[in-house]
Image (cartoon, grey):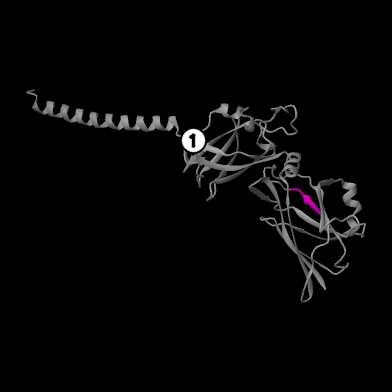
Amino acid sequence: MSYLLIGNISALICDDCIEPLAKATLRIYLPEDHHLDNLPGNGFFSPLKQLSPDEVNGKAERLLAETVLDERGDYRLTWEQLHLFTEPLELDLRVEEMPGRAPGTRGATQYHLSKLVPHWKRSRDKYVAAFAYVIPSEHWSQIRGSYGTWVISGAVRQHTSMVSIPHLKVEAYNAQSGKLLGTAYTNGQGRYKLHFGLKDMPVGVLLPVRQGQYHKGPDVYFKIYRNDQLLWEEDIQTAQYPERRAIAPCTLLNITVQPSAVKRTANHLAQWLGGWSVVSTQGKTYLNELQLSAPF
């Protein structure tokens, strides 16, 4: 007999936006303590505990199986029957790659995720169970912050109807430097998810840590494009709003697109120039007629 465990591991960015833990490694261990006395309910979940290298090495002999999560955070893990199906298992998560982290940056961290007894069901020659977990946003924000990465999610909405607008390009800017932080596109529901990291920050610029805050995020404002044409540009002073200052590693920011005075001016200018072109053409025709009727 063998075991098959399937499922998904993701993290909350905000209440209505989930980020899959793509390319993270899920590790299954036989627990050091095989008793269930301290295992409430169907499993025990606590804030992810970061493990030291010594703690990871100390449990290496108990490693049962491991696998890398795919782009959606899904996994499929099998191992031979080396334990009773009533025994608890330890689940750890090893994170190295993170959206927004500079390519080639080394260093992985392992976190203890859970201790539980899966609900195994026998299917022919194997036991099958499913396990899915979503990391709470406050815990995921701390983990992202430790990697020097940020993710902003939200919707782009029309200012009168508040209807979300699909297929727009969203650019986030650092108000302290005016530099582009990252780019994303709204999906069919008008929602976007934008990643950036310390690699996108100006070298040598120290971002202030305000009292009561644990992160060092930038103050941000946005520009919105449709088909590479500027649709809406926020004033840089927008970055002084409380929700835009020193943003947390996981931040929800909805953007409201309002009529652009710059765009209206440009349209009026184009119309005026178009009218001038007609007048100029008429004037040229009249001048030609005068020249043809001249006696010299």
Q: Is disc 1 placed on a helix, strand or loop?
A: strand
Q: Is residue 155 visible?
A: yes
Q: Is residue 177 above or below residue 88?
A: above
The N terminus is located in which quarter? bottom right
Return the residue found at the far bottom.
Answer: 124
Q: Which residues are magenta?
A: 91-96
The residue that mark 1 highlights is 232
Q: Is residue 281 left or right of residue 116?
A: left
**Residue 68 x/y as whole percent:** 74, 57
**In terms of image quadrants, where is residue 199?**
top right
The C terminus is located in which quarter? top left
Q: Is residue 270 left or right of residue 83?
A: left
Q: Is residue 245 left or right of residue 25?
A: left
Give, as a three-letter code, the residue at label 1. Answer: Trp
Mark 1 closeness class: few <14, some 14–19, many ≥20 residues within 10 Å: many
Q: Residue at left 75%, top 40%?
A: 142
Return the residue found at the far left.
Answer: 295
Instruction: Looking at the picture, tell me which residue is in the foreground, 67 or 199.
Output: 67
Number of disc labels: 1
**Residue 167 x/y as whole percent:** 50, 47
95 drawn magenta: yes
Q: Residue at left 79%, top 76%?
A: 125
Magenta stretch secondary structure, dominant: strand
Q: Is residue 76 visible?
A: no
Q: Is residue 63 above or below residue 152?
A: below
Q: Is residue 120 above or below residue 167?
A: below
**Residue 160 x/y as whole percent:** 47, 38
**Residue 15 x/y as whole percent:** 66, 46
Return the residue found at the far front.
Answer: 41
18 drawn magenta: no
